[in-house]
Image (tube, rainbow, N blue to C red):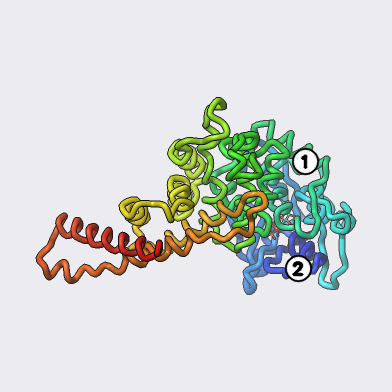
Amino acid sequence: MQIYKVGGAVRDRLLGKPVTDIDWVVVGATAEEMLANGFRPVGADFPVFLHPKSGEEYALARTERKSGRGYGGFTFHASPEVTLEEDLIRRDLTINAMAEDDQQNLTDPYHGQRDLEARLLRHVSPAFAEDPLRVLRVARFAARYAALGFTVAPETLGLMRELSESGELEALTAERSWKEISRALMEDQPQVFIEVLRDCGALKVLMPEVDALFGVPQPKAHHPEIDTGVHTLSVLEQSALHKQPLTVRWACLLHDLGKGLTPEEEWPRHIAHEHTGLKLIKTVNERFKAPKDCQELALLVGQYHTHGHRALELKPSTLLELLQSFDVYRRPQRFEEFISACEMDARGRKGLELRSYPQADYLRGAATAARSVAVQPLLEKGFKGPELGEAIKRERLKALKAYKEEAST
Ligand code: CTP
């Protein structure tokens, strides 16, 4: 049997990037031989094994044939006769379809190296269409390598468009899609992921609520970029520039969905978009089964981001309601993430990227003031049950009034 390093490990070594995961392909072996050599099978059907010591993935060279819709619809053909070239041709991109032996000799039948130099994400063959998840993968690679100058080859974008229009994307499971989306959002230029999905018509299928924001105007005074879709991309871009966690990036992407529902005759104003957007945010959250912390923050940011921007003008009672809604006493980190998302929203506007955001410190100060109310003295005064709750609220309100007064002097 011959063993080759394949996929991302070869690509990233040639790009001079750190290699974290190594995938191997084994040519000329049977599953029985692998088991006899101590490899552990990954699943019942997949010809993939884990190395007994390193735990790295070793896949038997295989050809794939599509037999139905979605991920379950694959049949694998793995046998010792399948050649390295036959295995590589069914992979997604030419830059991912190179193999290397233990002497670092490169096998590159589909010109991956040429495309690396040309900075092109190009599909290897029509077999690309076997797995619709590849539409998301290509958009994710575009986001990751945008800084190096990579773009999607026009013919690949065309194929992605065909796949998007074919209805195949609907067959993807929430889990597989979310894995790609969450990884793409954590790349350096996540806005490129959304742009590429939009360019090939996949955004309309995967997140029509985000797609609908393009072409929707906002008031120029607050939004020099005008277009709500463009604004959303800038907010996402800011969130990556500021190294925000996934929760914040997800909230940034979804914060303005309500603007897509505003009747045209009300444009460019979007009265109550914070409320109209909530059901859309919920739908998108559920469609991808986003983790609970991402779901929660997206909903809270959707509902309260304008409160964040108006923080300095809010009445102490409104400020208190905001802090209560975030349960800032038990969940301080979540409030901090809310503040970050508001700041990204304020900076994701054309020409305003470097503006200061005094609301952030003001909100932090308000949270500290409300948190500083001690419960013990109220217990000692004999308050209990709902009365205790009311007494704590009154004290917090007092603290916030004092805080607001002090801040305005
Ligand atoms: N692959 C593919 N189609 C997919 C998934 C994977 O063709 N839907 C192939 C590609 O050749 C890829 C290799 O399997 O390079 C390994 O896949 P994976 O580990 O998911 O990705 P990497 O390319 O290693 O990229 P990353 O750095 O994102 O992990």
Q: Where does residue 211 sit, x and y in percent of width and height?
A: 62, 37
Task: State whether residue 17 appears in this view.
Answer: yes
Q: Where does residue 217 sit, x and y in percent of width and height?
A: 61, 35
Where residue 150 sits, quadrant-wise, is bottom right
Q: Residue at x 33, y 66 (%)?
A: 369
Q: Secondary structure at mark 1?
A: helix
Q: Is residue 172 left or right of residue 271?
A: right
Q: Is residue 379 left or right of residue 299?
A: left
Q: Examine the rendered structure and indicate whether residue 151 appears above or below residue 211.
A: below
Q: Where does residue 35 sit, x and y in percent of width and height?
A: 64, 64
Residue under label 1: 157
Q: Where does residue 51 sit, x and y in percent of width and height?
A: 65, 68
Q: Which image quarter is the N terminus in?
A: bottom right
Q: Residue at x 50, y 49 (%)?
A: 290
Q: Quadrant of ligand 1?
A: bottom right
Q: Nearer the viewer, residue 51 or 252?
A: 252
Q: Examine the rendered structure and indicate whether residue 393 appears above or below residue 21.
A: above
Mark 1 Cα-neighbour bin, 10 Å: few <14, some 14–19, many ≥20: many
Residue under label 2: 17
Q: Nearer the viewer, residue 348 or 159?
A: 348
Going by the numbered disc 2, the residue's amino acid type is: Lys
Q: Mark 1 CB in 8 Å range of ligand 1?
A: no
1 or 2: tag closer to the N-terminus: 2
> Looking at the image, do the residues carrying marks 1 and 2 touch, with CB atoms under 8 Å apart?
no
Q: Residue at x 36, y 67 (%)?
A: 368
Q: Is residue 256 left or right of residue 272?
A: right
Alpha-carbon span between mark 1 and mark 2: 25 Å
Q: Residue at x 19, y 71 (%)?
A: 376
